[in-house]
Image (cartoon, rainbow, N blue to C red):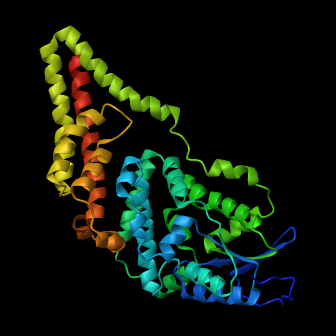
Amino acid sequence: MANPDDAPFPAHEYDSDVHTVSFGDKTIILVGTAHISQESVELVQTVIKQELPDCVCLELDDKRYQALTQKKQWQALDLKTIVRNKQLSTLLVSLLMASYQKRLGGKLGVKPGAELLAAAQTAKDLKIPISLCDRDVRITLRRAWKSTSFFKKGYLLTSLLASLFDKTEITEEKLTELKQKDVLTELMDEMGDSLPDLKRVLIDERDLYLVEKIKSTPGKRIVAIVGAGHVAGMKKKFEEDNKELLAEITNIPPVSKSYKIIGWTIPAIIIGSLITIGVQKGAGVAGDNLLFWILANGIPASIGALIALAHPFTTIGAFAAAPITSLTPVIGAGYVTAFIQVLANPPLVKEFETAGDDIGTFKGWWKNRLLRVFLVFLLTGFGSAIGTWVGGYEIVKNLVG
């Protein structure tokens, strides 16, 4: 391992993307990169070779590092576990963002994360240890999803989908700008001020996390490779002691009490109304209302499954599950049908590999079995939601009418 005490380190001339920060007895060379820029690939290689640091810190967690370095990272993806743990939403957002990044990278002829991979390889060649300093991507995505309101979740998904299907040619000026900018920051800029909580989780919290991890990295001379969008925030946080905040920003926030109350209020109203109708108007009338509830939920959910070209077992499951799941906030019809779809029509190996490309085409969502699982999840869930309101309205109307 290279040691700064064994040889002098001359001051090297770099461009404005390289910043030197002092912390105690540490000297940190902070390199801001664009994750889709060939210039960034060359820059990180040059800086590491010239500085010969004690350690190279990367804006990566273990999962993303494995995804970059292992061509068959899909083998580690257990889709059934993801559905059981109700993480399909975060996986979908992750795929959408990765596809967005890949699309921009394709315009520049560079694979997303190429500079991080180049930094890791350069460090390995020079026998310099690397440190993965970013927060677990699953925690980041789940915190981001939890921090976003129901309506803004829809806005986020719509914005990401719109960016995928936008075929507008990128100008030379835009390409030049992208080479100097982190793609995640570009995405946040496009969304403007409409999603401040999302920016806090994706950018600000990670600034803090990266800084504290870099501070605790062994060695006196550190080269840290991070997205350009993190540099300004990170430089400010080197002057602060935020170690005690690490536990807080690595926790998944629990479901709020108000959300739980609302979630159980609707089932309580429906069940209470059916019981009251039975007492006041007889079991026959209550049975008619119960049948209406079953049809109002089951039909739209199964139509959603049919539109998604789901497996017949999934369509049957949608009809059966929706009336029941609508009476509990613990699990939605979308997760039940997604799980059935995975079991009945599991994605092929090649479809995991091509999902990033297929997600950018309308036809690809139906052709790719992995993406079809998401369609099943979204469309049956949407159908069940419609049924809940239609069925609930009819039952309450019959109660008070």
Residue 368, image x, y percentages = 26, 67
Coordinates of residue 42 in the picture (x, y in percent): 61, 89
Left or right side of 374 for 9: right
When asked about the image quadrant of residue 274, the answer is top left
Name the image quarter holding the N terminus.
bottom right
**Residue drawn where x is 16% and y is 29% of the image:** 292
Looking at the picture, does residue 330 appear above or below residue 280? below
* Image-quadrant location for residue 372: bottom left
Looking at this view, is 393 or 290 the one in front?
A: 290
Which of the two residues, 178 or 235, is positioned nearer the viewer here? 235
Residue ID at (18%, 18%): 286
**Left or right relative to 350: residue 394:** left
Residue 17 percent across, percent down from the top left: 68, 81
**Quadrant in which residue 354 is drawn:** bottom left
Classify 254 as above or below 223: above
Drawn side of residue 225 relative to residue 2, left or right: left
What residue appears at the point 84 percent right and 88 percent down from the top-left corner?
9
